[in-house]
Image (spheres, grey):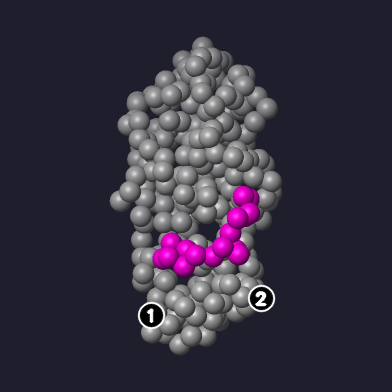
């Protein structure tokens, strides 16, 4: 039987575990991180594996995870192997079958992106879905600009600020149909001065801006800024596996979020319980 939970099915190693290739103590990586997060959400605290502000839980299959797996397996009448085996991942998949939260995105395009829109949306769905958060396409449209507007918005020259109160960003974010204040508008433009994206927006209009030439994870990254807000620290993570690292060019695999980031995102007015 195939894995069906968005928390797990994007991980090749967890898919392999369901097929019989168990993961055991000594392994590390995103698959281990996702199982740690799942067990924590089910009430299995992992104080030794958490606490790093940039990569937590740590994705290391050590003695703590082995013990928590044995506790989980025993509680669910599974053979207490202490491994992420077929029965264990199938049980986790059954207990955490779908989404607990939802983020709705409205896309407004002034430019074609180098990475196809469908790929950027799919990648956002994967990275947030790994934590039970459904990224939902709410609406999309290309904005027809006048020649004067084409000249103005061909390159956004203003600095990116957390709270937008004027300038080209404010003009841009007022273009196109409005959206509920609990949803997020995503604007795609040709170019931004000094940045590939900006999560700043007006107080009453959650939005972010993404340049056409950025990489596949940029949309998920800028949406993350809107959800985390300026109150979260660190704003950018130095960890090269974290979605909120400052330069998303360098991801070689699906990025992750920390338990603290996920908790903050789920408190956002733009992240609804479902």
What SS does tag 1 mark?
loop
Can you say whether 151 is above or below 30 in the image?
above
Q: Residue at x 35, y 40 (%)?
A: 138
What SS does tag 2 mark?
loop
**Mark sitting earlier along the chain (1/2):** 2
**269 horizontally vs 245: left or right:** left
Coordinates of residue 211 in the picture (x, y in percent): 58, 33
Asked whether 108 falls inside the magenta stretch, the response is: no
Q: Nearer the viewer, residue 25 or 217?
A: 25
Coordinates of residue 30 in the picture (x, y in percent): 59, 63
Q: Residue at x 35, y 55 (%)?
A: 100
Which quarter of the rendering shows the N terminus?
bottom left
Asked whether 51 falls inside the magenta stretch, the response is: yes
Q: Mark number for residue 76?
A: 1
Coordinates of residue 10 in the picture (x, y in percent): 50, 63
Residue extent of the magenta highlight: 39-55
Give me the C-alpha separation between circle 1 and circle 2. 24 Å
| Residue 93 in sight in this render | yes
Place residue 179 in its image quadrant.
top left
Q: Nearer the viewer, residue 111 or 238?
A: 238
Q: Residue at x 45, y 87 (%)?
A: 79
Coordinates of residue 90 in the picture (x, y in percent): 42, 76
The residue sitting at the bottom extreme is 79
Q: On the image, numbered disc 2 is attached to which residue? A: 26
**14 horizontally vs 241: left or right:** left
Mark in the foreground, 1 or 2: 1
Can you say whether 173 is above or below 140 in the image?
above
Q: Nearer the viewer, residue 197 or 256?
A: 256
Q: Residues within 10 Å of mark 1 (few under 14, many from 20)?
A: few
């Amino acid at each position: 039987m195939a894995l069906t939970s968005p928390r797990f099915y994007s991980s090749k190693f967890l898919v392999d575990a369901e097929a019989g290739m168990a993961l055991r103590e000594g392994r590390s990586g995103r698959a281990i991180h996702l199982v740690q997060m799942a067990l924590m959400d089910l009430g299995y605290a992992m104080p030794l594996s958490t606490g790093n502000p940039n990569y937590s839980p740590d994705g290391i299959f050590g003695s703590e995870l082995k013990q928590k797996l044995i506790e989980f397996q025993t509680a669910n009448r599974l053979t207490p192997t202490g491994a992420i085996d077929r029965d264990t991942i199938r049980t986790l998949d059954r207990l955490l079958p779908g989404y607990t939260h939802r983020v709705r995105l409205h896309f407004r395009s002034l430019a074609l992106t180098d990475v196809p829109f469908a790929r950027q949306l799919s990648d956002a769905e994967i990275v947030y879905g790994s934590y039970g958060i459904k990224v939902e396409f709410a609406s999309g449209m290309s904005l027809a600009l006048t020649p004067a507007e084409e000249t103005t918005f061909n390159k956004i020259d203003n600095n990116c600020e957390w709270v937008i109160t004027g300038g080209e960003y404010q003009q841009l974010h007022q273009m196109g149909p409005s959206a509920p204040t609990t949803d997020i508008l995503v604007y795609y433009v040709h170019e931004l001065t000094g940045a590939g994206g900006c999560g700043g927006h007006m107080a009453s209009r959650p939005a972010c801006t993404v340049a056409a030439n950025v990489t596949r994870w940029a949309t998920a990254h800028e949406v993350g800024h809107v959800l985390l807000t300026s109150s979260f620290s660190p704003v950018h993570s130095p960890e090269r596996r974290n979605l909120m690292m400052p330069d998303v060019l360098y991801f070689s695999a699906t990025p992750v979020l920390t338990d603290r980031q996920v908790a903050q995102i789920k408190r956002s007015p733009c992240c609804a319980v479902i």
